[in-house]
Image (cartoon, rainbow, N blue to C red):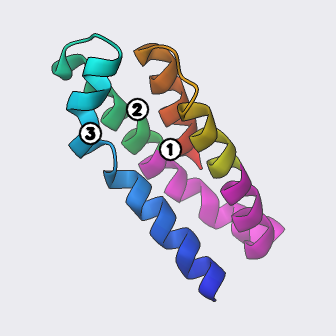
Amino acid sequence: MLILGIAGFTVMADNWVVSPILPAISNSFNVAAIQADVLITAYMIPFGLFQLVFGPLADRFGKRQVINIAMFCFVVSTALCTIASSLSDLTVYRALTGFT
């Protein structure tokens, strides 16, 4: 139960971590702050849509299996965000993070 709680906290924190640092991200990639807003959309749309997918997957393959795979993919896609070399790369990696 503790691990599930920590995983839930981490995922929810990831939902909101980008908003306050958008100015720093836009400065880092030398783009306007309004362009960096795409990162929020790239994450939240897949996140919302895949909530509908994970329920049936958990029923079919087991909750533990689906959570383990989703958390592994979340860790990998979040790690990819750290090596993004452009805003478009980061947008793709944030979308992958949103899917998990």
User: Which span is picked out in magenta?
Assistant: 47-72
Mark 1 crowdedness (10 Å alpha carbons): few <14, some 14-19, many ≥20 = many
Above or below, comparing residue 63 to residue 20 in the picture: below
Q: Secondary structure at mark 2?
A: helix
Q: Observer-nearest residue: 7 or 84?
A: 84
Determine which residue is flagged by label 2: 42
Circle 3 SS class = helix
Q: Amino acid at mark 3?
A: Ile
47 relative position to 100: left or right: left
Give the residue displayed 65% in from the left and 50% down from the top: 75
State the quadrant of the N terminus.
bottom right
The residue carrying mark 1 is 98
Tell me if 5 is positioned left or right of 74 in this view: left
Q: Earlier in the sequence, mark 2 or mark 3?
A: 3
Tell me where residue 38 appears, x and y as whole percent: 31, 26
Disc 2 to disc 3, how far (Cα)? 16 Å
In the picture, residue 39 is in which quadrant? top left
